[in-house]
Amino acid sequence: MIPRTRHAAVLAIPLLLLVSRSVAQEKTGTAQDVEKRLKAAQKPHGVTPLDNVLSTLFATHNFKQAAISPDGNSVAWVEEVHSKNGVISGRTVIYVKNLKSGAPPKRLGAGVADSLHAESDVAWSSDSQKIAFLSDAAKKGQLQLHVINAAGGTAKILTNVKGFLANPGWSPDGKTIAVLFTENATRASGPLVAETPATGEIKDTFFEQRLAVVDLPTGKLTQITPADTYIYEYDWSPDGKHFVVSSALGNGDNNWWVAELSTLDATTGLLKSIYKPKLQIANPVWSPDGKQIAFIEGLMSDEGLTGGDIYIIASDGSEAKNLTKDRKASAAWLGWLPDKKILFSEYVGGNSAIATLDPATGKIEQHWSAEGALTSAGVFGFLLSPSKDGKAVAGIFRSFSHAPEVVVITPESPTPTLVTSRNASLKPAWGEAKSITWKNDGHEVQGWLLYPRDFDPAKKYPLVVYVHGGPSHITLSHWPGTHDFSSGLAAMGYFVLSPNPRGSFGQGEAFTRANVKDFGYGDFKDIMAGVDEALKVAPIDPNRLGITGWSYGGFMTMWAVTQTNRFKAAMAGAGLSNWQSYYGQNLIDQWMIPFFGKSVYDDPEIYAKSSPINFIKKAKTPTLILVGDSDGEVPAPQSYEFWHALKTLGVETQFFVYEREGHLFANPKHQRDVIARTLAWFDAHLRQ
């Protein structure tokens, strides 16, 4: 899960850092012993499987965004900058390629030629002639809005603000650019970055992300939404006179889970609520005639991890209607086409797909499906970047067998057409991936079984279960990033099972909601049934099983070792050990209500029944625990509490806290250490 808190871990940090130095000496599984056992598995030529996987992951060129021009003739993308030693932290570049001319891509950006900056958030003008983007070329660490001709030239800086800018969007007439602006913010918004430590009197203070408009000729920025309202997403109306926004009063970190749908007058700033959802909403967009608004509503544990049903509502707030009720899939993104159909992406089982929906008839046509992950931005969502007519879609495609590349999909060529070939030389350091399904409690559950590298069917192998975060999320076939240690296990000679148990996306809203008030019970049964299925279909040694995960996967790992002794080793990353204490440690209690029904103060028993700490005396499994000291999503004291209990009860454990890291680690050295330490832990406990 990726809920958010700001101050919870502050007092515990100094103690935890000392703990991370001392815990390595606990029991027999010291860090030194683990490293020795890992080195003993070296190949004869001196290169370890760990070396292979690290070199593969850190040599991968990663793309942050891909955006096709409205006319479908060009694609712009943002990619990380690499040096001989890997990614240059925080530096990104923008390229544009004309798909018709066959000419090589051109680099666009701010500052002097070939200078390196943080550049992102590409947005095409409606005539496909210009590109708006954000860059810190003027001052490192401070993004400003720029505009440049798509054909090249010098970028014009439009803003001179202090704070955080995001998501520029052109007005229909091309005279104005809207942008999300958090004035005087000291860091990027979002649930994954490291929190800023707080001292002194702790108050419920926050910065509001407001919608602003920038006049193109003058660069004047005007904030048009109220100062007490946080804006999450927006879309221009076709006539440019209004916006539709998802917003909430007060603390934006905490209140996304109760955000409402509103219309906003672009001139007066008048905000009018038109829909109060029962669950969470995302991706509101106007219909071409301005009469309707489409959006996605469903049970979502995290902003940005979208999955649910497609709804439409009249722009005046009447006649809200669910267009995909009972569909065995989860919509992840949507946009309107000129013919008034809705183009959308969805998760179907463990696959991704693109389809169209006719709101008038309810007819759905699937146009593309694949074993792989496609997105136009980030790594967690399934966002599309379509041309205006919807006949071409750009995105970043990746799978277990294909490293990420920018691609275009068209009706004439449903197989993705490569726009880039940055990773053409990379080959998987792990084995083949197979989708498997199994039945449990009336559910058909899907998961991915990643085979060991150099698989020999005559041998028996250990298995590690890798549980995804969320819980409202899904594991697709994907090329792992530097934060993903599961592929390294397969490279080291393990089967890896990545299940999508109830609570996941991909099988409809009822399946996603099936773990409400039931964390650790039905979903855990689904996972264990998946282990049994894996034992049936692959040569796995049942006496060498492990389990791991990060965030909700970290919770499930802590839960697993208190419920069964089938696992001989475990690694819990940023896990939750005690839902009751967690509720009081974080400042985002709103996210928990849809899943637990009530607050911990109104129904403490529902939180207690799913807390691993309440079953800790059953734990016997050697467990490695990892967390960042500035994790605002799952505060470090949750890991400390579990480690302390294991140590007290004499269960083999190690605990490592990483300095100045949030929920997802940013420091490449720490990313490498997480991978190496996790692999070494399992290697020490599951090797014969």
Image: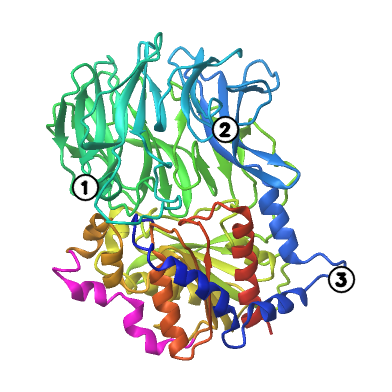
Tell me the quadrant of the picture where the N terminus can be found: bottom left
User: Whole-percent x and y of residue 259?
Assistant: 22, 43
Q: Which residue is drawn at 58% across and 63% down?
A: 486
The amino acid type of the residue labelled 2 equals Val
Q: Which residue is drawn at 51% across and 25% down?
A: 68
The amino acid type of the residue labelled 3 equals Pro
Q: Vertically, is 171 above or below 366?
A: above
Viewer-nearest of discs 3 and 2: 2
Asked whether disc 1 touches disc 3, contact meaning CB atoms under 8 Å apart, the reply is: no
Q: Does the magenta stretch include residue 175?
A: no
Q: State whether residue 577 appears in this view.
A: yes
Mark 3 → mark 2, Cα distance in angstroms: 40 Å
Q: Upstream in the sequence, badge 1 or badge 3?
A: 3
Tell me the quadrant of the picture where the C terminus can be found: bottom right
Find the magenta span and give its range.
599-620
Image quadrant assignment for residue 592: bottom left
Q: Residue at x 16, y 71 (%)?
A: 603
Asked whether disc 3 touches disc 2, contact meaning CB atoms under 8 Å apart, the reply is: no
Q: In the structure shown, which secondary structural element does the residue marked by tag 3 occupy?
A: loop
Q: State whether residue 361 appears in this view.
A: no
The amino acid type of the residue labelled 1 equals Val
Q: Which of 503 and 77 is in front in this view?
A: 77
Residues packed near mark 1 inside 10 Å, few (<14), some (14 to 19) or many (20 plus):
some
User: Whole-percent x and y of residue 643?
Assistant: 45, 79
Q: Residue at x 36, y 49 (%)?
A: 329
User: Whole-percent x and y of residue 123?
Assistant: 46, 24
**Residue receiving disc 2:** 78
**Residue receiving disc 1:** 258
**Residue receiving disc 3:** 44
